[in-house]
Amino acid sequence: MKTIKLAVIPGDGIGHEVVPGALGILERLGEIHGGLKFEFEHFDYGCDHYLQHGDMMAPDGLERLSQNDAVFLGAVGDANKVPDHISLWGLLIKIRREFQQEINVRPAKVFEGIRSPLANPKDFDLMVVRENSEGEYSSVGGRMFHEEHEIAIQSSVFSKRATSQAMHYAFDLAASRGKMVTSATKSNGIYHAMPFWDDVFKEISSDYPDVSTTSEHIDALSASFVTRPERYDVIVASNLFGDILTDIGAAIMGSIGIAPSANLNLNGKYPSMFEPVHGSAPDIVGKGIANPVGQIWTAKMMLDHFGYTELGSKLLQAIEDTFREGIMTSDIGGSASTHEVTTSILDKLQ
Ligand code: NAD
Ligand code: IPM
Ligand code: MN
């Protein structure tokens, strides 16, 4: 019997509404497999923890999390309690950085039967590979002077190591799929970092003669994600561009509530972390209508990561069948509750 130890952090807001159902689904899949068991260690880290203890996680938090095989996270953030940059840098971004989760993978694909803002979406199936540790997300800079003289300086950091690592990851992924990588750039406006990004992209691409490449400015690429998403296979993007692009990817699927993501540690020193693309959704918290599919599809990404791809496929099939039967939450045109969607997916697993 193989046991996967999971550190579970529901976090804030709807994290508490979507995580428990996904854990039940993982347990069911373990039973179906017969040789796989999950052991959950629950952590109450989040904004309430901050209000009680003055920190988003306990002092030995990272140490305890690291004793697990993966982190399974809901969402973090409750700006009524803690300013967002404090809560996110104290938990989500801290884990990504300390556990060297330098790659963030986020798929977007067409699903049958759900409401999408695209009138007639063609059959798209793409993957965004987001550099997850540096770029525009940096603490380098500061605020100084006062009143009308106040200035804020925020530096971006692009290392050759992390940039080329993200690009290698994207090319390797494309080599196993549609054999095309698009680089999200902005070298017409960002004077230093993006010409550097383009140079590294060119250099890495020469190692992959079988993979075709395009380079598109992030503004045009964002528009094209909406008008012609079927053109893309793998997109490699900096931390901020990847963040924005993957909310667009989620939206064209139908809703930010269904998109999953994997924060991958590639050197094997720390656990990877799996979390949906969406946040804590304070506007719908407590209503029982949060779409649980982002969290559940995230569980599929985690199963794939651990090599249980057959279980992962079963789970994706159950999601697709549930949509096809019209069982869905209101964000994608249905009237089902979080619980009803979760139960439908669970019942389809055998
Ligand atoms: P959000 O994703 O929480 O919400 C944006 C919109 O999408 C809202 O209208 C919300 O109701 C809707 N939505 C999100 N998830 C949904 C779901 N599963 N089902 C149905 N509708 C859903 O983004 P935001 O409003 O910008 O952020 C709210 C808080 O979450 C902030 O504190 C933010 O910093 C945080 N956040 C955390 C993460 C994370 O932990 N990974 C990601 C994004 C935002
Ligand atoms: C995401 C989120 C985070 C990010 C925020 C909450 C810091 O938007 O995971 O997409 O920007 O990475
Ligand atoms: Mn985001």
Image (cartoon, helix red, strand yellow):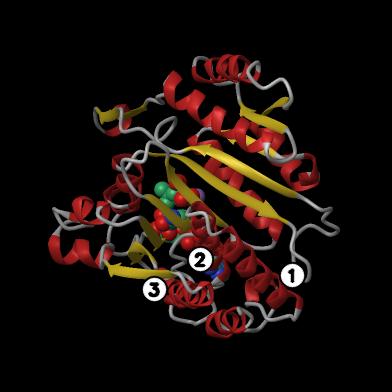
Q: Quadrant of the C terminus?
A: bottom right
Residue 30 at least partly seen? yes
Residue 148 percent across, percent down from the top left: 32, 31
Q: Earlier in the sequence, mark 2 or mark 1?
A: 1
Viewer-proximal residue, 234 or 244? Answer: 234
Query: Are the residues tagged 3 and 2 within 8 Å (C-beta)?
Result: no
Q: Earlier in the sequence, mark 3 or mark 2?
A: 3
Identify the residue position indicated by label 1 in the image: 114
Viewer-proximal residue, 1 or 46? Answer: 1
Q: Earlier in the sequence, mark 3 or mark 1?
A: 3
Q: Quadrant of the N terminus?
A: bottom left
In this rendering, the answer to whether 46 lies above or below 271 is below
Identify the residue position indicated by label 2 in the image: 295
Query: Mark 2: is the Cβ under 8 angstroms from ligand 1?
Result: yes
Q: Amino acid at mark 2?
A: Gln
Residue 75 at least partly seen? no
Q: Amino acid at mark 1?
A: Ile
Q: Which quadrant would residue 10 be assigned to in this image?
A: bottom left
Q: Amino acid at mark 3?
A: His
Q: Which mark is residue 16?
A: 3
Q: Secondary structure at mark 1?
A: loop
Q: CA distance from mark 3 to mark 2?
A: 11 Å
